[in-house]
Structure formats: structure tokens, C-alpha cells
Image: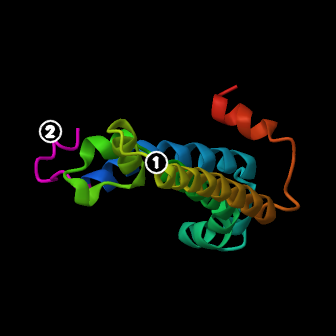
Amino acid sequence: MLTQLYTFIRLGTSAEVLGLVVWNLSWPAIIVRARLATIGKSYEEAAADLGASPFQAMRRVLLPLLLPAVFASTVLVFAGTVDDFVIVNQLSSSAATQPMSVLIYGQSHSGLGGPALNALATLMLVFSVLAALIGLAGYRWLTRGERGSGREALQTVAGM
């Protein structure tokens, strides 16, 4: 879609970034929507009752409550993007714009893989897992005191 409809976007870094943004936009939408479902409208209505404008209510009440969801979705998207291969491989223009995952794939299939390549792949895997664990720890820390069963958010997101 990026290269056929928007011809002003050339293959390379800009096309890779736009492709990854389009592909990963659904994760923050799901996570933030679940967080909005658990928050409800009561905080926003209370801020309006106290005289806050809609913008002030969003900035001073809603955004701080959404911060854990934004943080969790950022870490989740980052962990997934680090080793995303298919999109970046299709949208890269040359070897200068290839990330690690494409380099590892290319070298392992051309027979040039070795201990250094295996170590690099292991480091990428460890880095992705660490990013996800840091995100989980940060989310748990940001939502301390708010934990429930989580069923309400799942039911709202699923439309039940």
C-alpha cells in the first residue's frame, strides 16, 4: 500500500518506519481501549463537575490514568519491532537500511552464519525479552493499587 498508493514514499528508512507504524498501531489501540474501559466516565464527569473544560479534564485526569497503558503499549510495540522481519525486508531499499533481523536472515541463508551471528541473534532475543519484562514491571508499578480481576476491561473490549 505504501509504495503503490503513495508514490512519493520511496523504499528505505521512511517506508520502513511508516510500514511498522501502520502494522503496530493496533496494539496500542487495544491496550488503551481496555484501560479506558476500566477507567470509565466517572473521573471525566467529576472533573467536569469541578469546572474543568474537556481539554483540562483530558490533560489533567484522563492522560495520567492512561499513562500505564501508553507505557505498556510502547514497550510491547518496541519489543515486537526489534525483530520484525517481513515488513522491513519488503520495504528496505539497500543494505544500508537493513536492520539486524534482515542481516541475520540473509547471512544464515547464504551460509555465512557462524558463532558471531548466533551470538547476535541470541542478544536480540534476550533484548526483546528484557524489554517485555521491563514493560511488565513498569506497568505493574504504574498501576499499583488499581489491580482488579481485569474481567471488566476484557468484557468491554470483546463487546460482551
Callouts 2 and 1 close, C-beta under 8 Å: no
Locate the N terminus by quadrant: top left
Q: Main secondary structure of the magenta part?
A: loop
| Residue drawn at (46%, 51%) of the image | 117
Measured Cα–Cα span from mark 2 to mark 1: 38 Å
Q: Secondary structure at mark 2?
A: loop
Left or right, 113 with respect to 72, comes to left
| Residue drawn at (80%, 36%) of the image | 151
Label 2 or label 1, whichever comes before in sequence order: 2
Q: Residue furthest left?
A: 7
Which amino acid is tagged 2?
A: Gln
In this orientation, which residue lies closer to the viewer: 30 or 21? 21
Q: Is residue 24 magenta?
A: no
157 to 84, vertically: above or below: above
Residue 49, quarter of picture: bottom right
Q: Indicate the position of residue 57 as horizontal and vertical percent values.
A: 62, 68
Q: Examine the rendering and report whether any part of residue 44 can be seen.
A: no
Q: Which residue is mark 2?
A: 4
Q: Which residue is mark 1?
A: 114
Q: Nearer the viewer, mark 2 or mark 1?
A: 1
Q: How many marks?
A: 2
- Magenta extent: 1-14
Left or right, 144 with respect to 88, comes to right
Q: Residues within 10 Å of mark 1 (few under 14, many from 20)?
A: few
Q: Is residue 12 magenta?
A: yes
Please, which colouring scheme is shown? Answer: rainbow
Which amino acid is tagged 1?
A: Gly
Q: Residue furthest top?
A: 160
Q: Indicate the position of residue 35 as horizontal and vertical percent values.
A: 68, 50
Q: Indicate the position of residue 3 as horizontal and vertical percent values.
A: 17, 43
77 to 59, vertically: above or below: above
| Residue drawn at (53%, 52%) of the image | 77
